[in-house]
Image: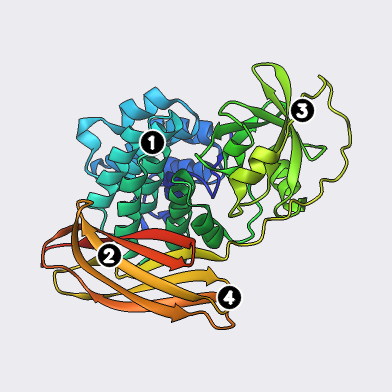
Amino acid sequence: MTKVSWHAVFFAFLFLKPIASVSQVQDLPQIVLRANAEFEKGNFNEALTLYQQALREVPPKYQGSTNIQIGACYALLKRNEEAIATLTKPDWLHDVVPTFLWLGYVHAAMREYSEAALDYQKVVDFSSEQCTGYPGLADMLSHAARYDEAQLVINRGSTRTCDESRQQELRDAQLLVYLGKGMYQEATRLSGQTKRIYAEIESAQGGVRIAFVPKGSPAQLAGLEQGDIIVTFNGEPVGDLDALRSAVNKAEFGASVPIHVKRDGNDMGKKVIIGILPNLPELAAATKPGILPSTPAATSPSPSAVSPAAPPFLSILGVEVKPSTVTPGQQFSMRVSCTADATDQVSFSYAIHKDGQRVFESGSESISTGRARQVTIDKTLTAAGIPGEYAIRVRLASGDKTAEAEAVLIVIKR
């Protein structure tokens, strides 16, 4: 069964490489070379058999890595209990990072998200690579609806030196947090006009199965649930993952698209909005799914695009703090992006809180938007002298219009 996440795949798939790069190892037996080749081609049953044979032949220094590859094969074959038993053998826990990456993958596949988060925390603790584990940990905390903890992990991960792929994974993790907390303007700003329904999917007989539905996503707001099988999308049959991706890409961004779903053997009609819009919950509530006949029509009229409502006259698009982890007394920058009605006089204020009550610093000023509808406010601030987690709360006001947002700052000991 093939599985793909709403943004890529579970983070552990980044470690789909066999034991040490074969071209750099001269003393591996031929059977391991053959196992590696089968693994890289996705032939996991064949690779498993060869790795099990190899375990009796490889030198002791490679037995731990070979055992991890056996656990990886079990994981990818959905033999979860065998994978866990293999990866937790006490004699072979010396390769900590790949071991816990695969354990995290298995626990995530079993919907044990808090357990998976513990696995990824081990990866963060033991990895020598600065970004390894942070996206997976943040993802799993969000899957477990622990959004505040996920935000802290994202903030810490963002201070590391990451390559572009890891940065994208952190942005995807941030999107899960925004959706889970109902921060649709921030989610819209981050996602842009990406054509997705934002659900984890996997191949299934007769269609594509929903494996996980993130809170606040277009998929959840459409009424899709874990276990649903999508049979047609906008009138097109979707027998596999590629067919569904193709159908989604053909749809207009912001369109409300009819889909045919099977749930517990029953046929259902749903409508899902393509992409994330600032007023997505309201648009989804206005969508009225119907009940489909047992045999869906071969074609369906093209949906008309749902036009998003005009942006509010006063709204905060985002609050960015850099760096987000500082030492006492260190300066940091805060950038607030907002939209306002033309020529508005806007009152801007901020306050830095700790433990939800104590205010360490605050300030206010009046700004004029002039002819620009979008305004950026930049401030240079100084961190408090007491280590801990701080909330930076920002407020805009103009007449009877207000907008508020919040960012997190972590102050650590020198």
- Name the residue carrying label 1: 144
Disc 2 + disc 1, Cβ < 8 Å = no
Q: Foreground mark, 1 or 4?
A: 4
* Percent position of residue 35, x then y: 47, 40
Q: How far is disc 4 from disc 2 in space, using C-alphas?
A: 25 Å
Mark yes or no: residue 405 visible. Answer: yes
Which residue type does callout 4 highlight? Arg
Which residue is denoted by mark 4 in the rendering?
Answer: 373
- Tag 1: amino acid: Ala
Labels 1, 3: front one: 3
The residue that disc 2 covers is 351
The residue tagged 3 is 290
Q: Secondary structure at mark 2?
A: strand
The amino acid type found where label 2 is placed reads: Ala
Query: Quick check: can you spot residue 58?
Result: no
Q: Earlier in the sequence, mark 1 or mark 4?
A: 1
Q: Is residue 288 above or below residue 333?
A: above
Task: Compute the Cα span from label 1 to label 3.
Answer: 31 Å
Q: Nearer the viewer, residue 25 or 341?
A: 341
Quadrant of res 329: bottom left
The mark nearer the N terminus, 3 or 2, is 3
